[in-house]
Image (spheres, rainbow, N blue to C red):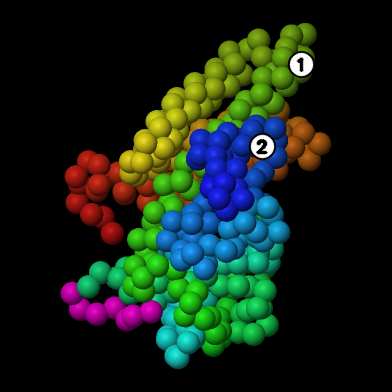
Amino acid sequence: MIPEEYGGAGLPLSAGAVILEEIHRSGGNTGACHAQMYTMGTLLRHGSDTQKRYLPGIADGSLRLQAFGVTEPNSSTDTGALQTTAKREGDNYVINGQKIWTSRAEHSDLMILLARTAPITEGTKKTSGLSVLLVDMREALGKGMTVRPIRTMMNHSATEVFFDNLLVPTANLIGDEGKGFHYILSGMNSERILIAAECIGDAKWLINKAVNYANDRTVFGRPIGQNQGVQFPIAKAYANMRATELMAQEALRLYEEGKNPGAEANMAKMLASDASNEAANVAIQTHGGFGFAEKYDIEQKFRETRLYQVAPISTNLILSYLSEHVLGLPRSY
């Protein structure tokens, strides 16, 4: 998704979606690489020519832009309430605060950091006064930045990051000061669509596992897949996965036409996370006790795909978005 002029392949979002889906459909997980597809978008769309010098390194793999420093312990998805501050002092910003669930910060050279450069004042939105900074983690670690891993039920290399008077050059400000929230939002639709592709891949892998096992496993002298009690849940999961594909394709079409498919991207992500979660439950149930055995890999994929009900945005927040912005219902939060 990085243009050829910066050493990238210049492929569209749909190509990225195909790649991520295929990795998951093959039983893998793209947690180690997917963030680079949408975090670098902020730099690509809003960075200065000087800042874009990092793009060729990101394209050829010599630089890793995985860390996305937004979420905080006390703000969660209420981004306007974040408390990490960036105070301008001469030619530097002084960063103080904490981020959490900053995946792969241990394995990243650069970080896209959202911090407050101006306090909240009466009559202004909470999201005003937020700015985006490009942090060179190779220089920051041990000099005001500390990264601590968080052990979780699946491997996304989750971390928390602490800032203690970290100096970041003012030249690393991406775009205009105070407009950072909008820069971050501009990449959210692509993130939702790519996560949907991952979930669709997971659902396909899990459904395929369930079908193969239902055909091969014989109990009472017949394959268990001959029983409608086994067939129907698998067929239902398949139908839901296929319907989700159509929503994801619609979101991709609108995105690549230059439109703002906020509703479609959010619905694709929500429906895909539901479809993959349903397929995981069906695969566990079809395999019975063997679904919990490491040998069959079902338990690992079950744990991995459960994440998408919660992150990168929870199902409830998507429903709130649709209620307010699509259906015209009163804001609930």
- The x, y position of residue 137, in whole percent, is 63, 73
> Disc 2 marks which residue?
23
**How far is mark 1 from mark 2, CA to CA?**
25 Å
Q: Give the SS element for disc 1.
A: helix
Q: Residue visible at 63% across and 12% down?
A: 227
> Left or right: where does residue 226 sit relative to residue 251?
right
* Circle on res. 216: 1
Instruction: Give the answer, above or below, for where 288 lies relative to 177.
Output: above
Amino acid type, label 2: Ile
Q: Give the SS element for disc 2.
A: helix
Label whose residue precedes the other's in the sequence (1 or 2): 2
Identity of the residue furthest to the right in this view: 295
Instruction: Give the answer, above or below, for where 13 lies relative to 232.
Output: below
Q: Residue visible at 57% across and 46% down?
A: 4
C-beta proximity under 8 Å, tags 1 and 2: no
Segment tinted magenta in the rendering = 117-123
Amino acid type, label 1: Asp
